[in-house]
Structure formats: C-alpha cells, structure tokens
Image (spheres, helix red, strand yellow):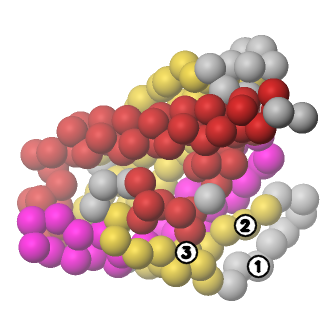
Amino acid sequence: MTILTRSSLLMVPVNVAYDVVNDVASYPDFLPACDKVELLPSGGEGNAEHVRARVTTGAKGMTYSFVTTNTCVVNERIEMTLDEGPFEVLEGSWIFKALSDEGCRIDLTLEFVAQGMLSRLLSPMANAVADRMVVAFTQRIQDVGDTYAQQSQGK
C-alpha cells in the first residue's frame, strides 16, 4: 500500500480552504490530469454531508474513472472512500485546522493500492503526483482566498 501525506499552511480562512476542496465539481478547472467530474446521488447519514462523484483522469494516453464518496464535516475534515474503480484500496482524508481568523493548516493523507496497468503507471510517480495535486489545491485555495479577501474589504 502506498501512503502519502502532505501539509500546507495557508493565509486564508479555514472555510475558504474547506470550500475549495469540497467543490469536487470544479476539480477539472485546476487539478492536473482531472478531465471530468460527474456528481452522483448520495445517501446521507447523521449530520455529515456526503458527496459522491465519478472522477475521470488521464495520463500517458490512458483514461481511468473511479467513484468515491466524501463524508464531510464542515470546515474540519473530508474523508474519501472508494466505491468503484481501478484500485484495490483508495482512501484519503483532508484535515482543516484554523490557526487564526485569517490562516489555516490543511493536511492530506492518501492511501492506495492500484490494480493492473494503473499500478505500473502510478507506482513510480506517486510522490510527484501527490506534490502536483497539493500545489494545485494550494494555488486554487490562495486564488479563491484572494477573491474572498477583496470581497470582504469591499463590504
């Protein structure tokens, strides 16, 4: 099993970081190799929000699709589990920690075991893929945070 962890300190309110990560439908706009996202019906239980989506990614001429369910606790955490796809295991979590009204820390943990051709593609470059993913999320969070700050100052 491959386990990847990454953290980032950001000068944006925790709700901005959470909203960007929770906006799964926008992933193709900024996430490398994310070609398409289709939001699917999801059943909820308890007070947690559930987001279910089919994500289509492409790399090196190959296209892969997988379905995940995200269980969300607003501004605190997002837990991702695999429903179907070319992985034996795919689990992840985002943890959001407010450090002040204007700053936060985000922690990403991904655990996966890929199957078949995807395993041969991902294994040698898993760390680089995780780094690019975190950089893309961090940049998107900062961009949205800048817009948020400008709108707050204009009020």
Of callouts 1 and 3, the N-terminal one = 1
Number of marks in the rendered image: 3
For numbered disc 2, what is the local secondary structure? strand
Cβ–Cβ under 8 Å for marks 1 and 3: no
- Percent position (x, y) of residue 56? 36, 75
Cβ–Cβ under 8 Å for marks 1 and 2: yes
Residue 127 in view, yes or no: yes
Is residue 34 placed above or below 154 in the rendered structure?
Answer: below
The residue drawn where x is 74% and y is 19% is 102
Q: Nearer the viewer, residue 133 or 28?
A: 28
Cβ–Cβ under 8 Å for marks 2 and 3: no
Residue 67 in view, yes or no: no
The residue drawn where x is 89% and y is 63% is 46
Region rendered in magenta? 55-83
Query: Image check: 120 left or right of 77?
Result: left
Query: Image check: 119 left or right of 17?
Result: left
Residue position for label 1: 43
- Percent position (x, y) of residue 150? 72, 32
For numbered disc 3, what is the local secondary structure? strand
Q: Nearer the viewer, mark 1 or mark 3?
A: 3
Amino acid type, callout 1: Gly
Is residue 39 placed above or below 128 in the rendered structure?
Answer: below
Amino acid type, callout 2: His
Of callouts 1 and 2, the N-terminal one = 1
Amino acid type, callout 3: Ala
Q: Give the CA distance from mark 2 to mark 3.
A: 10 Å
Residue position for label 3: 53
The residue drawn where x is 59% and y is 78% is 39
Is residue 60 located in the magenta-colored stretch of the structure? yes
Q: Residue 15 sits in which quadrant?
A: top right
Q: Residue 35 sits in which quadrant?
A: bottom left
Residue position for label 2: 50
